[in-house]
C-alpha cells in the first residue's frame, strides 16, 4: 500500500506521532505531507492510506489546520486519524478531525488520542517518546489484524465528543516577545505557521498568533521568549495541575 503521513505540527509532537504510525503501516517507506506552514494540495485514491495527525488546541482541531485540510481530497481512501494533546483532554478534537476527513472523501479505519509535551509549562516533557511509538506500532498491528486486510469498508468508531463542537481551535493568547538578542536571521518568520511575524522579525500580530511557541523553540539566539510573570505563573500552575500522567487512547 502507498502510505502518506500528513501532519500539522508546529512543535513536532504531531509529526512524531504521524511518522511512527506511518512507519508501522509501511516499514519499507512512506511519503510525508507537511501542512504546518501552508496548504498543500493532495489527492488520494482507494489504494492509498493516509495518516492524519494534528494537535488539539483548546479541545478543537486548530482552525488553520482545518482550513488546510480542505485542500486534501480522498476517493474512498482509508486513513488513520490522530490527535496529539497536552495531557489535559482532547475534548471534541478527535471527533472533529474524523468529520473533516470524512467530508474530504476518506474512510476512517482507526483513531488515536496521543499524549504529547504541552506547549506551556513542563508537562509530559519528551512525549511522544519511544514508549509511545511502540504503543502506536501495536495499535497498527492490532488494527490490521482486525481488518484482515480490508481497509476499504466503512467502520463505526466510538469516538467521544459532541456536535456542535465546544470552544475554538486557537491558542490561549500568549504572544511571544523578542529580546535584544535577536540577530535578524528570519528563521522565526519563515517557520511561523500563520505568518504572524513581521518583516522586522520582532513584531508579532496577536490576532494571528496561535500561541504555538514554535518561534521560541526554534530561535537559535534564544531571543523569542515568554519571560513575563503573568505567563510564568500560569505555566507553573498548569504544570502542577496536569502533572499526573495520562495514557494514549486507541480506537478501531
Image: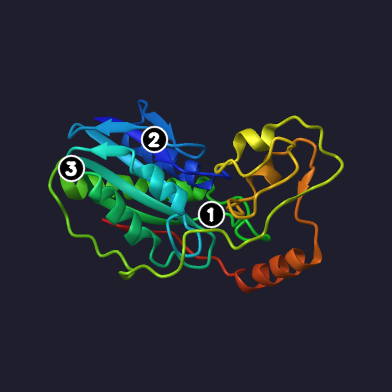
Q: CA distance from mark 1 to mark 2?
A: 18 Å
Q: Name the mark on residue 153.
A: none
- Identify which residue is drawn at 29% across, 55% down: 98
Q: Secondary structure at mark 3?
A: loop
N-terminal label among 1 and 3: 1
Q: CA distance from mark 3 to mark 2?
A: 17 Å
Q: Nearer the viewer, residue 209 or 106?
A: 209
Location of mark 3 (residue)? 151
Q: Are marks 3 and 2 in contact (CB under 8 Å)?
A: no
* Residue 204 placement (x, y as % from top left): 69, 47
- Identify which residue is drawn at 23% across, 60% down: 157
Q: Are marks 1 and 3 in contact (CB under 8 Å)?
A: no
* Residue 50 placement (x, y as % from top left): 31, 38
Location of mark 2 (residue)? 23
Asked whether, in this view, residue 163 is left or right of residue 169, the answer is left
Of circles 3 and 2, which is in front? 3
* Residue 51 placement (x, y as % from top left): 34, 41
Judged from this view, the residue extending furthest toward the right is 180
Q: Secondary structure at mark 2?
A: helix
N-terminal label among 1 and 2: 2
Location of mark 1 (residue)? 116
Q: CA distance from mark 1 to mark 3?
A: 28 Å
* Residue 106 placement (x, y as % from top left): 23, 44
N-terminal label among 3 and 2: 2
Asked whether, in this view, residue 242 is left or right of residue 152, the answer is right
Mark 3 is surrounded, within 10 Å at the Cα level, by few (under 14), some (14 to 19) or many (20 or more) other residues, namely: many
- Identify which residue is drawn at 56% across, 51% down: 127
Mark 1 is surrounded, within 10 Å at the Cα level, by few (under 14), some (14 to 19) or many (20 or more) other residues, namely: many
Amino acid at each position: 500500500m502507498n502510505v502518506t503521513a500528513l501532519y500539522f505540527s508546529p512543535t513536532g509532537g504531531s509529526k512524531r506521532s504521524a511518522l511512527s504510525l506511518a512507519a508501522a503501516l509501511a516499514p519499507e517507506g512512506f511519503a510525508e505531507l507537511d501542512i504546518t506552514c501552508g496548504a498543500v494540495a493532495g489527492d488520494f485514491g482507494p489504494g492509498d492510506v493516509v495518516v492524519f495527525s494534528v494537535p488539539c488546541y483548546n479541545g478543537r482541531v486548530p482552525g488553520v489546520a482545518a482550513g488546510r485540510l480542505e485542500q486534501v481530497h480522498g476517493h474512498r481512501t482509508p486513513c488513520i486519524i490522530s490527535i496529539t494533546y497536552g495531557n489535559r483532554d482532547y475534548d471534541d478534537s478527535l471527533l472533529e478531525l474524523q468529520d473533516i476527513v470524512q467530508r474530504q472523501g476518506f474512510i476512517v479505519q482507526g483513531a488515536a488520542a496521543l499524549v504529547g509535551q504541552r506547549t506551556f509549562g513542563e508537562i509530559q516533557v519528551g512525549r511522544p517518546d519511544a514508549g509511545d511509538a511502540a504503543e502506536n506500532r501495536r495499535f497498527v498491528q492490532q488494527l490490521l489484524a482486525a481488518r484482515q486486510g480490508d481497509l476499504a469498508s466503512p467502520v463505526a468508531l466510538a469516538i467521544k465528543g459532541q456536535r456542535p463542537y465546544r470552544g475554538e481551535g486557537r491558542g490561549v493568547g500568549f504572544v511571544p516577545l523578542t529580546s535584544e538578542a535577536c540577530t535578524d536571521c528570519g528563521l522565526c518568520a519563515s517557520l511561523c505557521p500563520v505568518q504572524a511575524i513581521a518583516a522586522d522579525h520582532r513584531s508579532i500580530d496577536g490576532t494571528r498568533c496561535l500561541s504555538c511557541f514554535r518561534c521560541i523553540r526554534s530561535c537559535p539566539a534564544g531571543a523569542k521568549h515568554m519571560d513575563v510573570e503573568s505567563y510564568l505563573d500560569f505555566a507553573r500552575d498548569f504544570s502542577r495541575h496536569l502533572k499526573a500522567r495520562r495514557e494514549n487512547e486507541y480506537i478501531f
